[in-house]
Image: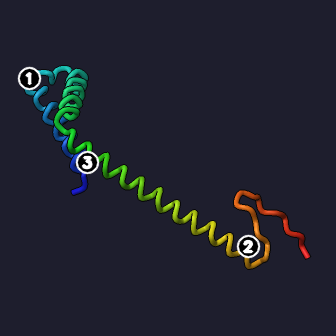
Amino acid sequence: MSPAIRYTMARITIFLVCLLLGWLLGLRDNPLLLLLLATTVSMLISLLVLRSMREQFATQVADKVEHRFATKQVKAARRRSDEVIEDDELGQPQMPNEAPQDRPQH
C-alpha cells in the first residue's frame, strides 16, 4: 500500500477514534464542540505519532516531482536538438537564444 494511502487512513482512523471518545464522554449534546475537539486532538496526535508515515509520504511526493522535472528536461532537450537538426537541414543556423527570423515567401 502506498505511503499516501496509509497516512490518510491512519489520520482518518485517529479522527474517528477521537470522535468516538468524545461521544462516549458525553459531548454528543453539542456536535460542533465534539467535532472541533475531535479535530484538534486528532491533529495533535497525528503530528506526534505519524511522523515517520508523513516523512515517507513527503519522500514519495518529492521523488515524483523530481522524476517529472527530469522527464520534462529530457523532452525539452530533445525538442531543442530536433529544432537544431531542422535548422541545419534548411541551412539556417541560429544562435541558441535568437528568435526565429521570418523567412520570405517565394
x and y percentages locating residue 15 in the rendered image: 19, 35
Task: Report the amino acid beneath label 1.
Answer: Leu
Q: From the viewer's perspective, tell me whether residue 99 is left or right of residue 25.
A: right
Q: Could you tell me if the residues under marks 1 and 3 are in contact, i.e. CB atoms within 8 Å?
A: no
Label 3: how many residues lie within 10 Å, few (<14), some (14-19) or many (20+)?
A: some
Question: Toward which corner of the image does residue 36 lie, by quadrant?
Answer: top left
Q: Nearer the viewer, mark 1 or mark 3?
A: 3
Q: Residue at x 75, y 58 (%)?
A: 98
Q: Residue at x 37, y 50 (%)?
A: 62
Relative to 52, is 76 above or below?
A: below
Residue at numbered disc 2: 87
Give the number of the disc on residue 25: 1
x and y percentages locating residue 92 in the rendered image: 79, 72
Label 1: how many residues lie within 10 Å, few (<14), some (14-19) or many (20+)?
A: few
Relative to 12, is 76 above or below?
A: below
At mark 2, the secondary structure is: helix
Task: Report the amino acid beneath label 2.
Answer: Asp
Q: From the viewer's perspective, tell me whether residue 79 is left or right of residue 72.
A: right
Task: Report the amino acid beneath label 3.
Answer: Gln
Going from N to C along the chain, the mark reached first, 1 or 3, is 1
Q: CA distance from mark 1 to mark 3?
A: 34 Å
Q: Return the residue nearer the eye: 101 or 45.
A: 101
Q: Residue at x 28, y 47 (%)?
A: 57
Residue at numbered disc 3: 56
